[in-house]
Amino acid sequence: MQGKRKKKSVPAAVCAVIVAAGSSQRMGGENKLLLELAGVPVLTHTLAAFEKCAAIRDIVLVCREQDILPYTELARAAGIEKLRTVTRGGDSRTASVLAGISAAPADTVLVAVHDGARPLVSEAVIAEAVYAAAETGAAAPVVPVKDSIKRIENGCIAADVPRDTLAAVQTPQVFRRETLLRALNAAVRQGRTFTDDCAAVEAMGQAVAATHGSYENIKITTPEDLLIAEAFLQKGAE
């Protein structure tokens, strides 16, 4: 993984695109971003992390149309001064990220795409990915896989997969704006679906630098994840 970068390599125009347009189906349909985490909505934690990070100049929030007003009010109440706009997302992650890039300030150099449901991302994780992308054009935080991984065929274990070659990728995933736009527009034209933005950029032949993630940078997907996040916050407060 890449080491920490010198701050002088970071351009001034870095915009975080916070993707918050999901339907929260695995949370029983309840909007997980408005659920309380240590007494504060999940989304407030996420926005605050980017507000505090000196490597981020602007924030664009992408969401469902019905959430634009409540999210705008939430950000205002939380004092999120870097938020430039709250814009409507699309029917897919790719469409939502494209909407966020389009809404970013015109002089944006780097785009840091982050899941709204990752509220515990640290300033260090954000900044390292930004520094690396400023030098290489694309970067994403990863953490080593802890479990033993097996390849399954016909319902049986067929082989071991070397764990030291695997990592779980997180967000923010940071790219030069024009690189990500080109990759996502190509995906749309080709009718291709990718699980994350790194995959779309990799498909264009662009290498993505791996930076240090954190096991605390979890994605809130199920009710159990909220309990885990609460435990991390409680541990940090001790």
Image (cartoon, rainbow, N blue to C red):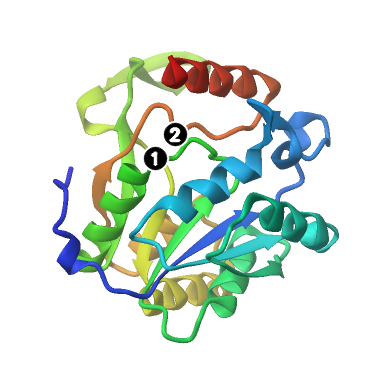
Would you identify the image quadrant in which residue 135 lies? bottom left
Please state if 94 lies on the left or on the right of 120 as rendered: right
Quarter occupied by residue 168: top left
Which residue does the image show at 73% across and 52% down from the upper left?
Answer: 74
* Residue 87: quarter of image: bottom right
Q: Earlier in the sequence, mark 2 or mark 1?
A: 1
Q: Nearer the viewer, residue 222 or 186?
A: 222
The numbered mark at residue 122 is: 1
Query: In the image, what residue type sits under mark 1?
Result: Ser
Q: Amino acid at mark 2?
A: Asn
Q: Residue 84 has which mark? A: none
The image shows residue 217, relative to residue 13, as above or below, that is above
- Does any portion of residue 162 appear in the rendered image? no
| Side of 45 where 113 appears, left or right | left
**Residue 82 visible in image:** yes
Measured as percent of width and height from the top left, residue 2 is found at 16, 47
Q: Position of residue 235 (x, y in %)?
A: 45, 15
Q: Are marks 2 and 1 in contact (CB under 8 Å)?
A: yes
> Which element type, helix, strand or loop, lies under badge 1?
loop
Q: Residue 144: percent from the left, percent from the top?
A: 29, 28
Residue hosting label 2 = 217
Which residue in the rendered view is the most extreme toward the bottom? 106
Question: Could you say whether the residue bearing mark 2 is in a helix, strand or loop?
Answer: loop
Q: Nearer the viewer, residue 30 or 168?
A: 30
Which residue is located at x 56 percent, y 51 percent?
47
Q: Residues within 10 Å of mark 1 (few under 14, many from 20)?
A: some
- Residue found 17% across the figure and 68% down from its top: 9
Is 99 on the left or on the right of 165, as rendered? Answer: right
Q: Residues within 10 Å of mark 2 (few under 14, many from 20)?
A: many
Residue under the point 32% across and 38% down = 213
Query: Would residue 119 appear left or right of 40 to someone viewing this image?
Result: left
Q: Is the N terminus in the top left, top right, bottom left or bottom right quadrant? A: top left
